[in-house]
Image (cartoon, helix red, strand yellow):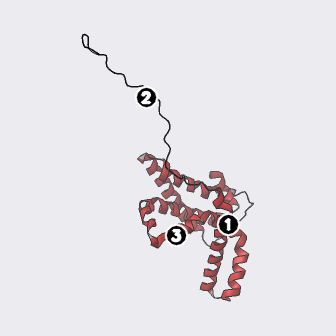
């Protein structure tokens, strides 16, 4: 993560296809996962929360001081601020996960389902989405943005269905099968008392 952050500050808008410039962002995502789903010690959780808060505040200050300049660190600070702030948002709103089961939020759940495919495909379809939007919206800003977004989501949904979905783990079907237990010893009859007749 540290190497990625340094790389991003030196080359803020250079992408070589190895995603080194985005490893810091993935790293924060992994930290959030461990914070929410793996780590149970309250002190360690508080330490992680404090580090993310410090990262957000520090990046925001640097972004504010360098905004509008050509300094490479400005772009890096902007991305780090957004990623860190969203990480805090995920941590704080974890207790509201039950709300996402409401029908009102079902479209967001479906969007979350294809979010990785959306990430993987959007960069390659920017020209396609812009061309489609330009032909339909004829330069109107709001319809243009909506059509581009719909194009991205549509392509991502197709990619998810044919390329990502086949490799996802399938839920187990049928009743759970219990592991065989050790054979029980046959019950023995108590021996008759002495002097009694069989």
The residue at which mark 3 appears reads as 108
The residue at which mark 2 appears reads as 184
Q: Label 3 to label 2, Cα distance in Å?
A: 53 Å
- Locate the C terminus by quadrant: top left
Would you say 54 lies left or right of 196 here?
right
Front in this rendered view, residue 35 or 185: 185
In the displayed structure, 85 sits above or below 134; it is: above
Q: Position of residue 50 (x, y in %)?
A: 46, 54
Residue drawn at 41 percent across, 47 percent down:
42
In the displayed structure, 90 sits above or below 185; it is: below
Q: Residues within 10 Å of mark 1 (few under 14, many from 20)?
A: some
Instruction: Give whichever of discs 3 and 2 has the lower sequence position.
Output: 3
Residue 92 is labelled as none
Residue drawn at 45 percent across, 71 percent down:
103
Q: Position of residue 22 (x, y in %)?
A: 65, 59
Residue drawn at 43 percent across, 28 percent down:
184
Instruction: Give whichever of discs 1 and 2 has the lower sequence position.
Output: 1
Disc 3 vs disc 1: Cβ atoms closer than 8 Å? Answer: no
User: In this orientation, does residue 108 appear?
Assistant: yes
Tell which residue pokes out farthest to the right in this image: 16
Tell which residue pokes out farthest to the top in this image: 195
Which secondary structure, mark 1? helix
Front in this rendered view, residue 115 or 35: 115
Q: Position of residue 107 (x, y in %)?
A: 52, 72
Front in this rendered view, residue 128 or 77: 128
The residue at which mark 1 appears reads as 159
Tell which residue pokes out farthest to the front in this image: 198
Would you say 197 lies left or right of 178 here?
left
Q: Label 1 to label 2, Cα distance in Å?
A: 54 Å
């Amino acid at each position: 993560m540290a190497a990625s952050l340094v790389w991003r500050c030196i080359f803020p808008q250079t992408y070589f296809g190895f995603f080194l410039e985005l490893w810091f962002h993935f790293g924060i995502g992994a930290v959030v996962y461990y914070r929410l789903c793996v780590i149970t010690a309250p002190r360690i959780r508080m330490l992680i929360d404090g580090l993310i808060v410090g990262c957000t505040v520090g990046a925001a200050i640097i972004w504010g001081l360098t905004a509008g300049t050509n300094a490479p660190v400005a772009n890096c600070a902007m991305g780090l601020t957004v990623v860190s702030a969203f990480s805090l948002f995920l941590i704080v709103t974890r207790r509201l996960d039950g709300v996402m089961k409401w029908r009102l939020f079902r479209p967001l759940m479906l969007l979350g389902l294809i979010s990785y495919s959306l990430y993987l495909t959007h960069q390659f379809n920017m020209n396609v989405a812009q061309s489609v939007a330009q032909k339909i919206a004829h330069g109107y800003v709001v319809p243009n943005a909506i059509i581009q977004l719909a194009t991205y989501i549509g392509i991502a949904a197709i990619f998810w269905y044919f390329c990502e979905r086949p490799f996802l783990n399938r839920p187990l079907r049928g009743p759970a099968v219990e592991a065989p237990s050790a054979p029980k010893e046959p019950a023995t009859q108590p021996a008759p008392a002495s002097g009694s007749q069989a």
